[in-house]
Image (cartoon, helix red, strand yellow):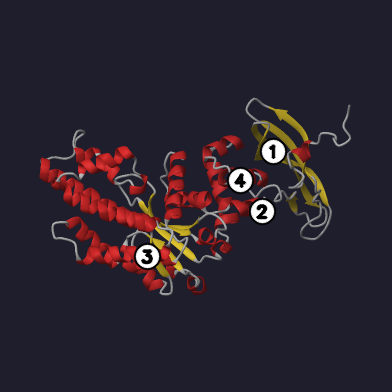
């Protein structure tokens, strides 16, 4: 029985052709695609010069890739009428700008689908090209152009930024050419707990001058609103921040601070291994088999791991490793302390002790102490700024690694930057609102 809420099937409405002012008049199903013949609903027979009535001269055909329906690419065959003015003799054709840009090969509906597939569904350009039934270059050029127009070139995307994260990123693994870029992240949503971090920009190369130039290009009112800049241990980012954002607080990320201590522990273990055995660690060497256990936080060690640690430190030959391991564990404990004031005090005392009371033989700890003392203000600033961490920056770096893997690598940096901004620029809410 026919249901009262159902209507007569309407191909124009189903394929959303009424929005760009088209009407479907016929269809042809091919093995590889569906072809819809369409006409422009607006007669557009009035002369744009004198207002006279146009005389029909025939039709032209315009082919547009549209969003896929029914699991196959959909192509629009648009019949466009041609006119000649009966008064001034001017020629023109029906306006199809609502359906597609002039000389475009993809309809506006197809572009909207492709942009949604790229930004929201994280499809590769190859999958998008297959869905539209066009060449890869056609799909890539169309999607990036539309992405710039709707999202990337929107000046409002820089509004409301108060916390920045900066880090380096390897965009390609080759022996020739610069493989590094500097990524700038908006960490304000993470601090305010309103959403995830988002990629603000990506600039070629990595140096103090690169980040300093990017900051100098920002409008002064925008730069004045920056409160915190989270970073790793690279001093170039610190110097650029001090020179261009004197009001901002530089925060060295806990991950990189702990990694410095972990590297000191590894260097001490390798040096001891060479001094005692005269070769690198092997599968049956206690120092080698304990390398991962040494990097595990004391609160997470199992009984078996504790036994391994106690056996390792049961000999005086490993006393330097034990001392370095103790410093590493104290640093982890300080960052895991829920009492931020007490944790700040403990870490400050640890940095001071590394600067003053470390024996000469512990060269790794002395080197670590000099580094931490130089950046002590940035390290301790973390405890005064809850929620400020470069961890979300590392997470976005991971998303970009996945993007590069899905695309099987990139050769063009401009293309990569645009794809990275669309992938991690936080455009999903904006795109939902537009579409």
- Which residue has dot 4 on it? 116
Q: Which mark is residue 76?
A: 1
Q: Nearer the viewer, mark 4 or mark 3?
A: 3
How many other residues sit within 10 Å of disc 1, few (<14), some (14-19) or many (≥20)? many
**What SS does tag 4 mark?**
helix
Q: Position of residue 300 (x, y in %)?
A: 37, 45
Q: Position of residue 234 (x, y in %)?
A: 32, 60
**What SS does tag 2 mark?**
helix
Q: Nearer the viewer, mark 3 or mark 1?
A: 3
**Marks 1 and 4, how far apart in space?**
20 Å
Q: Which mark is residue 433?
A: 2
Using the image, determine if residue 278 lies above or below residue 151: above
Q: Earlier in the sequence, mark 4 or mark 3?
A: 4
Residues 61 and 28: in front is 28
Q: Nearer the viewer, mark 1 or mark 2?
A: 2
Q: How many marks?
A: 4
Q: Nearer the viewer, mark 2 or mark 4?
A: 2
Using the image, determine if residue 186 lies above or below residue 263: below
**What SS does tag 1 mark?**
strand
Q: Position of residue 107 (x, y in %)?
A: 66, 44
Residue at horizontal 54 percent and vertical 42 percent from the top: 122
Residue 50 sits in quarter: bottom right
- The answer to whether 39 appears left or right of 326 in the picture is right
Using the image, determine if residue 313 lies above or below residue 362: above
Residue at horizontal 57 percent and vertical 51 percent from the top: 147
Whether the residues at callouts 1 and 2 have beta carbons within 8 Å, the answer is no
Using the image, determine if residue 45 lies above or below residue 138: below
Residue 214 in sight: no
How many other residues sit within 10 Å of disc 3, few (<14), some (14-19) or many (≥20)? many
Q: Earlier in the sequence, mark 3 or mark 1?
A: 1
Q: Earlier in the sequence, mark 1 or mark 4?
A: 1
Q: Which mark is residue 344?
A: 3
């Amino acid at each position: 029985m026919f249901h009262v809420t159902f209507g007569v099937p309407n191909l124009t409405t189903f394929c959303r052709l009424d929005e760009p002012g088209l009407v479907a008049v016929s269809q042809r199903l091919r093995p590889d695609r569906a072809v819809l013949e369409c006409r422009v609903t607006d007669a557009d027979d009035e002369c744009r010069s004198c207002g006279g009535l146009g005389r029909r001269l025939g039709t032209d055909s315009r082919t547009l890739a549209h969003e896929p329906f029914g699991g196959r690419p959909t192509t629009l065959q648009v019949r466009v009428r041609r006119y000649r003015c009966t008064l001034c003799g001017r020629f023109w054709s029906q306006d199809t700008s609502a359906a597609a840009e002039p000389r475009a090969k993809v309809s506006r509906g197809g572009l909207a689908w492709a942009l949604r597939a790229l930004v929201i569904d994280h499809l590769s350009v190859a999958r998008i090209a297959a869905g539209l039934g066009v060449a890869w270059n056609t799909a890539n050029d169309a999607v990036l152009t539309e992405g710039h127009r709707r999202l990337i070139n929107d000046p409002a995307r820089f509004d409301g930024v108060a916390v920045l994260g900066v880090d380096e990123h390897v965009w390609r693994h080759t022996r020739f050419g610069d493989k590094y870029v500097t990524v700038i992240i908006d960490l304000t949503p993470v601090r305010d707990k309103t959403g995830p971090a988002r990629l603000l920009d990506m600039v070629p190369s990595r140096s103090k001058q690169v980040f300093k130039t990017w900051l100098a290009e920002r409008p002064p009112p925008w730069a004045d609103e920056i409160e915190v800049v989270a970073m790793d241990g690279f001093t170039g980012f610190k110097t650029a921040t001090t020179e261009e954002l004197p009001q901002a607080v530089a925060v060295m990320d806990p991950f990189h601070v702990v990694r410095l201590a972990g590297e000191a522990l590894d260097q001490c273990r390798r040096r001891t291994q060479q001094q005692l055995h005269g070769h690198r660690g092997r599968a049956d060497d206690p120092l080698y088999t304990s390398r991962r256990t040494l990097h595990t936080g004391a609160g997470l060690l199992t009984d078996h791991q504790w036994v391994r640690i106690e056996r390792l430190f049961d000999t005086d030959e490993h006393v330097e490793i034990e001392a370095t391991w103790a410093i590493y564990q104290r640093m982890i404990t300080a960052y895991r302390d829920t009492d931020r004031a007490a944790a700040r005090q403990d870490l400050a005392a640890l940095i001071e002790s590394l600067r003053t009371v470390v024996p000469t033989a512990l060269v790794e700890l002395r080197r670590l102490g000099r580094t931490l003392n130089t950046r002590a203000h940035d390290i301790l600033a973390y405890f005064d700024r809850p929620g400020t961490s470069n961890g979300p920056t590392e997470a976005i770096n991971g998303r970009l690694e996945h993007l590069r893997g899905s695309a099987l690598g990139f050769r063009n940096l401009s293309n990569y930057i645009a794809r990275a901004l669309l992938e991690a620029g936080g455009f999903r809410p904006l795109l939902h609102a537009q579409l």
